[in-house]
Structures are given as structure tokens and as C-alpha cells.
Image (cartoon, rainbow, N blue to C red):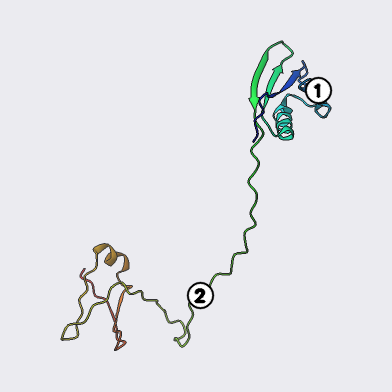
Amino acid sequence: MRIPVVLSVVHVAIDADGVLEVDVDGVPRDSEQGKTRGDLRAVIDEITSDLGAPVRVEVREADGSTFTDVATPPTPAPAVVEQPPTPPPPPALAGAGFQPGEEVALAYVVVRQNADTEGNASLNLPPALLAATRGGLVLLGMTSRTVTPFEAPA
């Protein structure tokens, strides 16, 4: 926004009926005929937008009271950036070969550990994780493909 060395002055006279009479630096604004007190903000925004600069506003009420302020051009609305179309979501995980009505679970590997010499495995997990996943974890032998429920101590 450019700010001139000398601000233009917008004179606004409001009569007893609330009708505005507006001039900018002494030049009447014909487009404001019939505007009322409720239109004042829009009138000032229009003037500052046309000028592209701040203005000094002097308002005189019918009772003789005055009000003076500096108004700046309204902030332009940010340009609407056209968003590219959202790509469709990737396909859900799918599989076949299950028994009709069979519950199918997806296992997530939280930790890996080698079984001992007798083929047993004992995994230590944080108690909060055990409580949240009890009954949902399985031990899956990566070579043998053996699946056994994880038996956490109660």
C-alpha cells in the first residue's frame, strides 16, 4: 500500500435522517446519494479502495458533533488457490481363499526375538501395550509359519 505525503480528506455529513453527504477533498461523491449511516463503512472502503491509499475521515453529525479517524483500504481477500483434485484413496488390503465368515486379522510386528534352544519365545513388552492389545497379538514363526497366540502374564 502506498501512503501519500498528504492524506486525502473524506468529509461525511450525516443529516438528522441519517442520510450521508460525502465528498473527497471537496469533490462530491455522487454515488453516495441515498446512503445512510449503516452504509458508512462500505462507502469509506469503496473510497480507500479506489484511491489505493489511506484517507482522513471527518464525520459531522446533525447535532454538530464531529469524529475524525484515518481509514485504510480493506485487506484484499487472499487469492483462492485451486486445489488439484484429491487422488482416490489407495485400494484397501484385500485377499482371497478364506473360509466364509472367517475373521481375518492383520498382524503388525512390534518386536522380533529368536526362540531359545527348546523352541520357546518370551517377549517383554510395556504393560500399556499388553493391556491395549491383549488377545490381538500373535507369535508368527517367520520360517515355520507357525502362528500361536501371545500368552501374556495376567
Circle 1 sits in a helix, a strand or a loop, which is it? strand
Instruction: Kindly give the residue lying farthest to the front in the view shown.
Output: 5
Q: Position of residue 18 (x, y in %)?
A: 76, 20
Question: Mark 1 or 2, which is nearer the eye?
Answer: 1
Circle 2 sits in a helix, a strand or a loop, which is it? loop
Disc 1 residue type (three-letter): Val
Above or below 56: residue 135: below
Pick the residue in front: 2 or 78: 2
Disc 2 residue type (three-letter): Ala
Image quarter of residue 69: top right
Pick the residue in front: 27 or 6: 6
- Picture residue at 81% right of the left edge, 26% below the top: 29
Q: Which mark is residue 37?
A: none
**Viewport quadrant of the N terminus:** top right
Q: Position of residue 135 (x, y in %)?
A: 31, 72
Q: Which mark is residue 92?
A: 2
Image quarter of residue 134: bottom left
Q: Earlier in the sequence, mark 1 or mark 2?
A: 1
Instruction: Kindly give the residue lying farthest to the top in the view shown.
Output: 64
Q: Position of residue 139 (x, y in %)?
A: 28, 79
- Marks 1 and 2 sit apart, C-alpha to C-alpha, by 69 Å
Pick the residue in front: 14 or 9: 9
Q: Position of residue 121 (x, y in %)?
A: 21, 79
- Picture residue at 65% right of the left edge, 34% below the top: 2
Pick the residue in front: 44 or 117: 44
- Picture residue at 62% right of the left edge, 62% below the top: 84
Q: Which mark is residue 27?
A: 1
Crowding at label 2, few (<14), some or many (≥20) Cα neighbours within 10 Å?
Answer: few
Q: Is residue 130 left or right of residue 80?
A: left
Crowding at label 1, few (<14), some or many (≥20) Cα neighbours within 10 Å?
Answer: few
**Viewport quadrant of the C terminus:** bottom left
